[in-house]
Amino acid sequence: MNALQEIKGHFATALAQLTGDPGPLLAMIRPTQDGKFGDYQANCAMPLAKQLGKAPREIAADLVASVELSDLCETIEVAGPGFINLTLKDSWLTRQLAAAQQDERLGIENAQTPRTVVVDYSSPNVAKPMHVGHIRSTVIGAALANIHRFLGHRVITDNHLGDWGTQFGMIIYGYKHFVDAAAYRKEPVSELSRLYKYVRVLMDYHSAVRKLPEAREALEKMQLAQERVSATEASGKSEIKQKKKDISRLNEKIAAQTEVIEGLAGTIEKVKADAALLSVANEHAAVGQAVLDETVRLHSGNPQNREYWDEFLPYCLEDINRLYDRLGVRFDYILGESFYHDQLGPVVEDFIERDLARESDGAICVFLDGYEAPMIIRKKDGAYLYPTTDLATIQHRVSEWQADTMLYVVDHRQGDHFDKLFDAARLWGYTDVEMTHVSFGTVLGDDGTPFKTRAGDTVGLEGLLDEAESRALAVAKAQNPDLEEGRQAEIGRVVGIGALKYADLSQNRSSDYKFSYDKMLALRGNTATYLQYANARVHGILRNMNVSVESLRGADGELIFAEPVERQMAIQLLRFSEALDDVLVDYKPNLLCNYLFDLAQLFARFFDQCPVKDAGSVELQQSRLKLCDLTARTLTTGLDLLGIEALDRI
Ligand code: ARG
């Protein structure tokens, strides 16, 4: 049961008699932050009064008189300038929770109009080691898929692997020139990964050598400009202000450019410091072009490169599957870019035939309103691009799976790509499908810049999981030194992985966030660890009192609200379904995290103020046990939807 939906439903009828467009007004009915104002508050009388040219309190009174909520609400009162405060009836509340208690789904109803939702997430470029950035897409995508599914939508998860790009050109080139055959036989995955990194170093070196002089020239120009501006006379307040502004803007540019130059020089230095590497780099001066050539040969069906690809791909998949297993993530489909290869030609032809794309400088382009540059779908040399594959993917998802919604959980830097892609797809006729880029920010280190290792490399995902687990193990040992080792390791795994996922999910996804092991594993605060410990504590109460949860759930008897916190808990438990709905409005799993955190905090207060064993009466004890059981089930279900395991005992 969803109280908010129920209330909105009744208001919708009442509002429809006063206005043609009740939608935005209904959105103004919300849970209250403060119990003083009841449990829910409707703020729609004020704007409606404005529309109708009447007094807000009068409209509020009309609404109160015409909504029929006597079953649900104890009181509906007009307050202040025209707020409507609604307080739920305790008897109604208890009835709902009794029903939740007996229901496997905690009383949460399925969506009235189920949709087919395709979630495109994780989607790493294989053959490169997965890094910290991949965790965001993987955990956010998995949570959104779980929540949609739980609410009765048909969900198809699809890992759109980058399995057809230049990185294969790189490992083919690497394999041909640098493979250590014995190492490859023994541990193919790590040898391929070494080859990838090795070729990357060579390519980056040559690209840095090429770019450095231009970068230095650009810096000199900026410095000259800065000197010129500094030397100009400025008189009067506004001129001085403008001059200051110009100088500071130029200084910022200079600082950024200096960093670029340092980066390039560092890349060159690293190679130069290693004489053997430098000589290899010099022998492979054309590595960049050669890698592109290998990629083109793969795409055009060269049998040898195709054979290499067939051989390498399973190793790459083995590598990422190990991580997915550790993260407990599964996909319904793993249709990588390679899957669409044969459809790219026909997609481009179709665009041309329908006059939606045309040639420009030899390339085939889709010109879209509102963008400076067109979307290129076939390059001059005949190669297809990332957007071409994505167009074929949309076609596939709609024709094969009848997708109503497609969610792309991909980092914010691809915003422009998706804006164009969706516009092009709509032009192509996909107007009835919702396509949303569920974008997310960057994972930052302590210093506020993108999270890197000390050596300046991206942080590998595997090492991250290892570290989180071993730190969680230390926490578990400190909390419970006598626990048997196997159990401790299990707790380390569940708490470590849970902390890592939750640290990510609990952030507003569009912001960058700072990665910190200490914060994510803190026993207090909005962390998975806090929720997992709270859940285990509730189980501890039930266990210590030898409660049979089956008979508890079947038992009659009203909830008793002896202390205010008990009623607050009941309301919060009832709001689980609202929290899940909220997540899907803007695809924000952090709203579920906030909800669970609030619930766990309320439980902590309840635990302090409301003795269970010594409740004083059998009825009150029973009522408190029911609240405990519902709390544990809500925490466990909520964590499960976030892809996080809960333990009965920690
Ligand atoms: N492989 C891409 C990358 O790592 C992400 C793919 C996202 N999904 C998509 N349909 N474009 O950047």
Image (cartoon, rainbow, N blue to C red):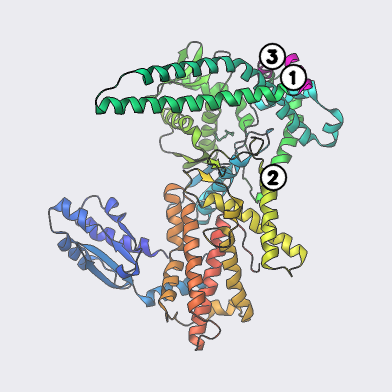
The quarter of the rendering in which ligand 1 is drawn is top right
For badge 1, the amino acid type reads: Leu
Q: Is residue 408 visible?
A: yes
Q: Residue furthest bottom?
A: 617
Front residue of 615/309: it is: 615
Q: Based on the picture, tell me whether residue 544 belongs to the magenta stretch.
A: no
Disc with the residue nearer the chain's start (3 vs 2):
3
Q: Quadrant of the C terminus?
A: bottom right
Segment tinted magenta in the rendering = 274-293
Disc with the residue nearer the chain's start (1 vs 2):
1
Separation of residues labelled 1 and 2 (CA atoms) = 29 Å
Q: Position of residue 59 (x, y in %)?
A: 17, 61
Q: Is mark 2 within 8 Å of ligand 1?
A: no
**Residue at which label 2 appears:** 463
**Residue at which label 3 appears:** 286
Q: Position of residue 122 (x, y in %)?
A: 59, 41
- Which of the 4 image quarters holds residue 332? top right
Front residue of 256/403: it is: 256
Going 42% across and 20% down the picture, which residue do you hit?
226
Give the numbered dot on residue 67.
none
- Vertical position of residue 524 compared to residue 272: above or below: below
Q: Secondary structure at mark 3?
A: loop
Specify few, some or many for label 3: CA neighbours under 10 Å numbering under 14, 14-19, or 20 or more: few
Most frequent secondary structure within the magenta stretch:
helix
Q: Position of residue 324 (x, y in %)?
A: 67, 46
Q: Position of residue 562 (x, y in %)?
A: 42, 82
**Residue at which label 1 appears:** 278
Specify few, some or many for label 1: CA neighbours under 10 Å numbering under 14, 14-19, or 20 or more: some
- Which of the 4 image quarters holds residue 290? top right
Disc with the residue nearer the chain's start (3 vs 1):
1
